[in-house]
Amino acid sequence: MPRAYVFFIHGVGEQAADSWSRGWQDALIAALRQYAPYDRQTPEQIGKDVLRFVPISYDRVFEGYRKRWVDFAGALADSEVLGDGPLQDALTWIAHDQDASVRQAFWTHALDAVLWAGLPQARAAVIASVIDQIVAGVKQMLAENAGADRAHWLAHSLGTSVLHDALICLRFAQDLHGGAFDPANFKWQSVSMVANTSRLLRAWKPLSQGVPLEQFHPYRSLLRPGSAESLTRSYHNIHHRLDPITWPKQFLPAGFTTGYSDDETQHFEDPTRVHDLAHYVENPLVHLRLLRTFLGDDRLGSAAEVDAVAKAFVRRFPLTGSKPFAELRDLFDDSSDKPLTLADLAKFLSRAFKALRGAA
Protein backbone atom coordinates (compact mmCIF):
# COMPACT_ATOMS: atom_id res chain seq x y z
CA MET A 1 0.00 0.00 0.00
CA PRO A 2 1.43 3.45 -0.89
CA ARG A 3 2.28 5.49 2.16
CA ALA A 4 0.17 8.48 3.13
CA TYR A 5 1.58 11.95 3.68
CA VAL A 6 0.13 13.59 6.77
CA PHE A 7 0.79 17.32 7.11
CA PHE A 8 0.58 18.52 10.73
CA ILE A 9 -0.05 22.05 12.01
CA HIS A 10 -0.04 22.81 15.74
CA GLY A 11 -2.02 25.05 18.07
CA VAL A 12 -1.10 27.89 20.45
CA GLY A 13 2.02 28.33 22.53
CA GLU A 14 5.71 27.80 22.03
CA GLN A 15 6.33 24.48 20.30
CA ALA A 16 9.66 22.71 20.73
CA ALA A 17 10.81 21.81 17.23
CA ASP A 18 11.78 18.24 18.07
CA SER A 19 8.91 17.31 20.38
CA TRP A 20 5.52 18.72 19.37
CA SER A 21 5.21 16.76 16.12
CA ARG A 22 6.92 13.71 17.60
CA GLY A 23 4.16 13.48 20.19
CA TRP A 24 1.54 13.54 17.43
CA GLN A 25 3.41 10.92 15.42
CA ASP A 26 3.82 8.64 18.43
CA ALA A 27 0.10 8.91 19.24
CA LEU A 28 -1.00 8.02 15.69
CA ILE A 29 1.50 5.19 15.35
CA ALA A 30 0.54 3.74 18.75
CA ALA A 31 -3.11 3.84 17.70
CA LEU A 32 -2.39 2.16 14.36
CA ARG A 33 -0.38 -0.63 15.99
CA GLN A 34 -3.53 -1.83 17.77
CA TYR A 35 -4.85 -3.17 14.46
CA ALA A 36 -3.65 -5.86 12.04
CA PRO A 37 -1.46 -5.97 10.04
CA TYR A 38 0.26 -3.00 11.65
CA ASP A 39 0.44 -4.71 15.04
CA ARG A 40 3.37 -6.66 13.61
CA GLN A 41 5.27 -3.57 12.45
CA THR A 42 7.65 -1.46 14.50
CA PRO A 43 7.04 2.28 14.93
CA GLU A 44 10.07 2.88 12.73
CA GLN A 45 8.63 0.74 9.94
CA ILE A 46 5.30 2.54 10.07
CA GLY A 47 7.00 5.94 10.03
CA LYS A 48 9.05 4.91 7.02
CA ASP A 49 6.62 2.87 4.91
CA VAL A 50 3.06 3.69 6.00
CA LEU A 51 2.74 7.27 7.29
CA ARG A 52 5.05 10.07 6.21
CA PHE A 53 4.70 13.05 8.57
CA VAL A 54 5.25 16.65 7.44
CA PRO A 55 5.13 19.08 10.40
CA ILE A 56 4.28 22.73 9.73
CA SER A 57 5.09 25.27 12.45
CA TYR A 58 4.42 28.98 12.92
CA ASP A 59 5.07 29.59 16.63
CA ARG A 60 8.31 31.48 16.00
CA VAL A 61 6.36 34.29 14.36
CA PHE A 62 4.32 34.80 17.51
CA GLU A 63 7.34 34.21 19.74
CA GLY A 64 8.95 37.33 18.31
CA TYR A 65 5.95 39.40 19.40
CA ARG A 66 5.81 37.68 22.78
CA LYS A 67 9.44 38.42 23.64
CA ARG A 68 9.09 42.08 22.63
CA TRP A 69 5.83 42.65 24.45
CA VAL A 70 5.77 40.61 27.64
CA ASP A 71 7.94 43.08 29.59
CA PHE A 72 6.03 46.09 28.32
CA ALA A 73 2.40 45.08 28.72
CA GLY A 74 1.44 48.08 30.82
CA ALA A 75 3.26 50.56 28.62
CA LEU A 76 1.67 49.12 25.49
CA ALA A 77 -1.77 49.17 27.01
CA ASP A 78 -1.45 52.81 28.02
CA SER A 79 0.29 54.05 24.87
CA GLU A 80 -1.09 55.34 21.61
CA VAL A 81 1.09 53.03 19.51
CA LEU A 82 -1.75 50.60 18.96
CA GLY A 83 -4.40 53.28 18.67
CA ASP A 84 -7.82 52.75 20.20
CA GLY A 85 -8.45 49.45 18.47
CA PRO A 86 -9.47 46.06 19.83
CA LEU A 87 -5.89 44.87 20.39
CA GLN A 88 -5.23 47.75 22.77
CA ASP A 89 -8.40 46.84 24.67
CA ALA A 90 -7.14 43.29 25.11
CA LEU A 91 -3.72 44.45 26.29
CA THR A 92 -5.29 46.98 28.67
CA TRP A 93 -7.29 44.20 30.27
CA ILE A 94 -4.36 41.83 30.71
CA ALA A 95 -2.09 44.58 32.00
CA HIS A 96 -4.45 45.29 34.89
CA ASP A 97 -5.86 41.83 35.67
CA GLN A 98 -5.09 40.90 39.25
CA ASP A 99 -4.80 37.13 38.72
CA ALA A 100 -1.14 36.37 38.03
CA SER A 101 -1.89 32.88 36.75
CA VAL A 102 -4.38 34.27 34.22
CA ARG A 103 -1.81 36.83 33.07
CA GLN A 104 0.74 34.02 32.67
CA ALA A 105 -1.70 31.94 30.60
CA PHE A 106 -2.28 34.97 28.38
CA TRP A 107 1.39 35.45 27.58
CA THR A 108 2.22 31.75 27.15
CA HIS A 109 -0.88 30.61 25.25
CA ALA A 110 -3.74 33.05 24.57
CA LEU A 111 -1.54 35.77 23.07
CA ASP A 112 -1.03 33.74 19.87
CA ALA A 113 -4.77 33.58 19.22
CA VAL A 114 -5.28 37.23 20.19
CA LEU A 115 -2.55 38.35 17.77
CA TRP A 116 -3.93 36.10 15.05
CA ALA A 117 -7.41 37.52 15.57
CA GLY A 118 -6.52 41.16 16.15
CA LEU A 119 -3.28 42.08 14.38
CA PRO A 120 -3.44 41.69 10.58
CA GLN A 121 0.34 42.08 10.26
CA ALA A 122 0.92 39.07 12.51
CA ARG A 123 -1.73 37.06 10.67
CA ALA A 124 -0.12 37.86 7.32
CA ALA A 125 3.33 36.92 8.60
CA VAL A 126 2.08 33.57 9.90
CA ILE A 127 0.31 32.80 6.63
CA ALA A 128 3.43 33.63 4.60
CA SER A 129 5.56 31.34 6.77
CA VAL A 130 3.05 28.49 6.60
CA ILE A 131 2.62 28.77 2.82
CA ASP A 132 6.38 28.55 2.30
CA GLN A 133 6.49 25.37 4.37
CA ILE A 134 3.50 23.85 2.60
CA VAL A 135 5.05 24.45 -0.81
CA ALA A 136 8.33 22.91 0.34
CA GLY A 137 6.52 19.91 1.81
CA VAL A 138 4.49 19.30 -1.35
CA LYS A 139 7.58 19.61 -3.54
CA GLN A 140 9.29 16.97 -1.43
CA MET A 141 6.21 14.76 -1.62
CA LEU A 142 6.09 15.05 -5.40
CA ALA A 143 9.82 14.35 -5.61
CA GLU A 144 9.11 11.09 -3.79
CA ASN A 145 6.63 10.12 -6.53
CA ALA A 146 3.51 10.76 -4.43
CA GLY A 147 0.51 12.87 -5.42
CA ALA A 148 -2.40 14.72 -3.88
CA ASP A 149 -4.30 11.44 -3.56
CA ARG A 150 -1.98 10.67 -0.64
CA ALA A 151 -1.87 14.17 0.93
CA HIS A 152 -3.80 14.79 4.15
CA TRP A 153 -4.01 17.49 6.83
CA LEU A 154 -4.30 17.20 10.60
CA ALA A 155 -4.73 20.57 12.34
CA HIS A 156 -5.29 21.39 16.00
CA SER A 157 -6.83 24.35 17.84
CA LEU A 158 -5.46 27.69 16.55
CA GLY A 159 -3.80 25.69 13.77
CA THR A 160 -7.23 24.94 12.27
CA SER A 161 -7.83 28.66 11.63
CA VAL A 162 -4.26 29.15 10.43
CA LEU A 163 -4.57 26.23 8.03
CA HIS A 164 -7.93 27.41 6.71
CA ASP A 165 -6.64 30.88 5.80
CA ALA A 166 -3.28 29.64 4.53
CA LEU A 167 -4.87 27.16 2.11
CA ILE A 168 -7.22 29.85 0.80
CA CYS A 169 -4.34 32.29 0.28
CA LEU A 170 -2.22 29.57 -1.32
CA ARG A 171 -5.01 28.73 -3.76
CA PHE A 172 -5.01 32.30 -5.07
CA ALA A 173 -1.22 32.85 -4.99
CA GLN A 174 -0.86 32.32 -8.74
CA ASP A 175 2.38 34.31 -8.84
CA LEU A 176 3.88 31.83 -6.40
CA HIS A 177 2.88 28.54 -8.00
CA GLY A 178 1.43 29.36 -11.42
CA GLY A 179 -1.82 27.53 -10.76
CA ALA A 180 -0.24 24.38 -9.33
CA PHE A 181 -2.55 24.59 -6.29
CA ASP A 182 -5.68 25.23 -8.28
CA PRO A 183 -8.10 22.41 -7.31
CA ALA A 184 -8.22 21.31 -10.94
CA ASN A 185 -4.53 20.43 -10.58
CA PHE A 186 -4.11 19.63 -6.87
CA LYS A 187 -6.75 18.68 -4.33
CA TRP A 188 -5.96 17.60 -0.76
CA GLN A 189 -7.34 14.16 -0.01
CA SER A 190 -8.59 15.19 3.44
CA VAL A 191 -8.54 17.97 6.02
CA SER A 192 -9.09 16.96 9.64
CA MET A 193 -9.75 19.77 12.13
CA VAL A 194 -9.43 18.96 15.84
CA ALA A 195 -10.83 21.57 18.27
CA ASN A 196 -11.81 23.77 15.34
CA THR A 197 -11.37 27.54 15.84
CA SER A 198 -11.76 28.62 12.21
CA ARG A 199 -15.15 30.21 12.90
CA LEU A 200 -14.19 31.75 16.24
CA LEU A 201 -11.06 33.35 14.73
CA ARG A 202 -12.49 34.19 11.31
CA ALA A 203 -10.62 36.91 9.39
CA TRP A 204 -12.28 40.33 9.66
CA LYS A 205 -10.39 42.01 6.83
CA PRO A 206 -8.90 40.78 3.52
CA LEU A 207 -5.65 38.91 4.03
CA SER A 208 -4.28 38.83 0.51
CA GLN A 209 -4.54 41.13 -2.46
CA GLY A 210 -7.05 39.81 -4.95
CA VAL A 211 -8.76 37.48 -2.45
CA PRO A 212 -12.18 38.80 -1.34
CA LEU A 213 -12.94 38.72 2.38
CA GLU A 214 -15.88 36.40 1.71
CA GLN A 215 -13.42 33.68 0.68
CA PHE A 216 -12.35 33.42 4.31
CA HIS A 217 -15.80 32.61 5.68
CA PRO A 218 -15.30 29.05 7.03
CA TYR A 219 -18.80 27.92 6.05
CA ARG A 220 -18.58 29.20 2.48
CA SER A 221 -14.88 28.95 1.68
CA LEU A 222 -13.18 26.58 -0.72
CA LEU A 223 -12.52 24.15 2.13
CA ARG A 224 -16.17 23.15 2.00
CA PRO A 225 -15.99 19.70 0.35
CA GLY A 226 -18.23 18.33 -2.35
CA SER A 227 -17.57 20.45 -5.43
CA ALA A 228 -15.00 20.72 -8.20
CA GLU A 229 -13.78 24.00 -6.68
CA SER A 230 -13.17 22.48 -3.25
CA LEU A 231 -9.58 22.34 -2.04
CA THR A 232 -10.19 19.01 -0.28
CA ARG A 233 -12.10 15.83 -1.02
CA SER A 234 -13.20 15.41 2.59
CA TYR A 235 -13.42 17.53 5.73
CA HIS A 236 -13.53 16.01 9.21
CA ASN A 237 -14.47 18.09 12.26
CA ILE A 238 -13.54 16.58 15.65
CA HIS A 239 -14.29 18.10 19.04
CA HIS A 240 -14.56 17.07 22.68
CA ARG A 241 -17.75 18.02 24.51
CA LEU A 242 -15.72 19.29 27.48
CA ASP A 243 -12.97 21.06 25.52
CA PRO A 244 -13.64 24.72 26.40
CA ILE A 245 -11.71 26.04 23.40
CA THR A 246 -14.45 24.64 21.14
CA TRP A 247 -17.37 26.28 22.97
CA PRO A 248 -17.48 29.83 21.55
CA LYS A 249 -18.51 30.07 17.91
CA GLN A 250 -18.80 26.31 17.49
CA PHE A 251 -18.15 24.90 14.03
CA LEU A 252 -21.60 23.65 13.01
CA PRO A 253 -22.03 24.07 9.24
CA ALA A 254 -25.57 23.15 8.27
CA GLY A 255 -24.72 23.08 4.56
CA PHE A 256 -21.80 20.64 4.69
CA THR A 257 -22.94 17.23 3.46
CA THR A 258 -20.88 15.38 0.85
CA GLY A 259 -17.43 14.56 2.17
CA TYR A 260 -18.09 16.03 5.62
CA SER A 261 -18.13 14.33 9.02
CA ASP A 262 -18.51 15.61 12.58
CA ASP A 263 -17.38 13.56 15.57
CA GLU A 264 -17.94 14.62 19.18
CA THR A 265 -16.11 12.81 21.97
CA GLN A 266 -16.93 12.90 25.67
CA HIS A 267 -14.71 10.46 27.61
CA PHE A 268 -11.87 11.79 29.73
CA GLU A 269 -9.67 10.82 32.66
CA ASP A 270 -8.03 14.14 33.47
CA PRO A 271 -10.05 17.21 32.43
CA THR A 272 -6.88 19.24 31.95
CA ARG A 273 -6.00 16.98 28.99
CA VAL A 274 -9.24 17.29 27.03
CA HIS A 275 -7.69 19.83 24.63
CA ASP A 276 -4.51 17.82 23.95
CA LEU A 277 -4.22 16.36 20.46
CA ALA A 278 -2.76 13.13 21.85
CA HIS A 279 -5.77 12.78 24.14
CA TYR A 280 -8.11 13.10 21.18
CA VAL A 281 -6.16 10.50 19.20
CA GLU A 282 -6.34 7.91 21.98
CA ASN A 283 -10.10 7.71 21.41
CA PRO A 284 -10.90 5.00 18.81
CA LEU A 285 -13.77 7.14 17.50
CA VAL A 286 -11.12 9.69 16.53
CA HIS A 287 -8.13 7.62 15.52
CA LEU A 288 -10.14 5.21 13.39
CA ARG A 289 -11.66 8.17 11.53
CA LEU A 290 -8.19 9.61 10.95
CA LEU A 291 -6.32 6.41 10.13
CA ARG A 292 -8.98 5.00 7.83
CA THR A 293 -8.96 8.32 5.98
CA PHE A 294 -5.19 8.57 5.78
CA LEU A 295 -4.77 4.98 4.62
CA GLY A 296 -7.84 4.91 2.37
CA ASP A 297 -8.98 1.76 4.15
CA ASP A 298 -12.47 1.79 5.65
CA ARG A 299 -11.96 -1.80 6.76
CA LEU A 300 -9.05 -1.01 9.10
CA GLY A 301 -9.73 -2.80 12.37
CA SER A 302 -11.71 -6.01 12.64
CA ALA A 303 -14.89 -5.99 14.70
CA ALA A 304 -13.07 -7.85 17.47
CA GLU A 305 -10.13 -5.43 17.44
CA VAL A 306 -12.35 -2.34 17.48
CA ASP A 307 -14.43 -3.78 20.31
CA ALA A 308 -11.34 -4.59 22.39
CA VAL A 309 -9.77 -1.16 21.80
CA ALA A 310 -13.05 0.62 22.61
CA LYS A 311 -13.53 -1.32 25.86
CA ALA A 312 -9.95 -0.64 26.95
CA PHE A 313 -10.41 3.04 26.17
CA VAL A 314 -13.62 3.32 28.20
CA ARG A 315 -11.95 1.59 31.15
CA ARG A 316 -9.12 4.11 31.07
CA PHE A 317 -11.24 7.15 30.28
CA PRO A 318 -14.55 6.70 32.13
CA LEU A 319 -17.48 9.05 31.75
CA THR A 320 -17.98 11.21 34.80
CA GLY A 321 -20.77 13.29 36.22
CA SER A 322 -18.47 16.14 37.21
CA LYS A 323 -18.65 19.49 35.43
CA PRO A 324 -15.14 20.82 34.85
CA PHE A 325 -14.80 24.35 33.51
CA ALA A 326 -18.38 25.19 34.55
CA GLU A 327 -17.35 28.76 35.32
CA LEU A 328 -16.13 29.13 31.74
CA ARG A 329 -19.34 27.79 30.23
CA ASP A 330 -21.34 30.27 32.31
CA LEU A 331 -19.69 33.11 30.37
CA PHE A 332 -21.77 32.28 27.31
CA ASP A 333 -25.22 32.40 28.92
CA ASP A 334 -26.17 29.19 27.08
CA SER A 335 -25.28 30.74 23.72
CA SER A 336 -22.06 29.69 22.03
CA ASP A 337 -22.72 32.38 19.42
CA LYS A 338 -22.55 35.23 21.91
CA PRO A 339 -20.58 38.10 20.31
CA LEU A 340 -17.04 38.42 21.69
CA THR A 341 -14.83 41.47 21.53
CA LEU A 342 -11.10 40.87 21.28
CA ALA A 343 -10.82 41.71 24.98
CA ASP A 344 -13.57 39.15 25.71
CA LEU A 345 -11.68 36.59 23.64
CA ALA A 346 -8.45 37.34 25.51
CA LYS A 347 -10.19 36.95 28.86
CA PHE A 348 -11.88 33.70 27.93
CA LEU A 349 -8.83 32.06 26.34
CA SER A 350 -6.53 33.11 29.19
CA ARG A 351 -8.87 31.62 31.76
CA ALA A 352 -9.47 28.54 29.63
CA PHE A 353 -5.78 27.79 29.16
CA LYS A 354 -5.18 28.46 32.85
CA ALA A 355 -7.79 25.77 33.61
CA LEU A 356 -6.39 23.39 31.00
CA ARG A 357 -2.91 23.78 32.48
CA GLY A 358 -4.30 22.90 35.88
CA ALA A 359 -3.34 26.23 37.42
CA ALA A 360 -4.56 26.78 40.96
Image (cartoon, rainbow, N blue to C red):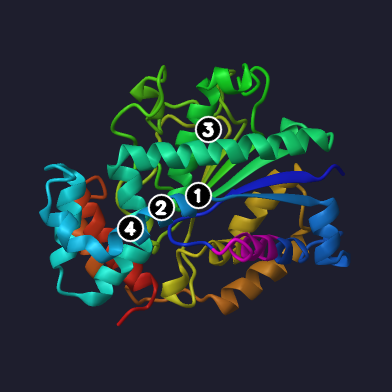
Distance CA(mark 2)–CA(mark 4)? 10 Å
Whether residue 229 is in magenta: the answer is no
The reply to whether discs 3 and 4 touch (Cβ–Cβ < 8 Å) is: no
* Circle 3 Cα neighbour tier, 10 Å, few/some/many (<14 / 14–19 / ≥20): many
The answer to whether residue 333 is visible is no
Residue 62's tag is 2
Q: Residue, x 74% and y 32% (percent of image)?
A: 149
Q: Residue, x 41% and y 52% (percent of image)?
A: 62
Q: Specify which label sits upstream in the sequence, 3 or 2.
A: 2
Q: Specify which label sits upstream in the sequence, 3 or 4.
A: 4
Left or right: 259 as drawn, with respect to 14: right
Distance CA(mark 1)–CA(mark 4)? 17 Å
Q: Specify which label sits upstream in the sequence, 3 or 1.
A: 1
Which residue has dot 4 on it?
A: 68
The reply to whether discs 2 and 1 touch (Cβ–Cβ < 8 Å) is: yes
Instruction: Tell me the amino acid under the disc marked 4.
Output: Arg
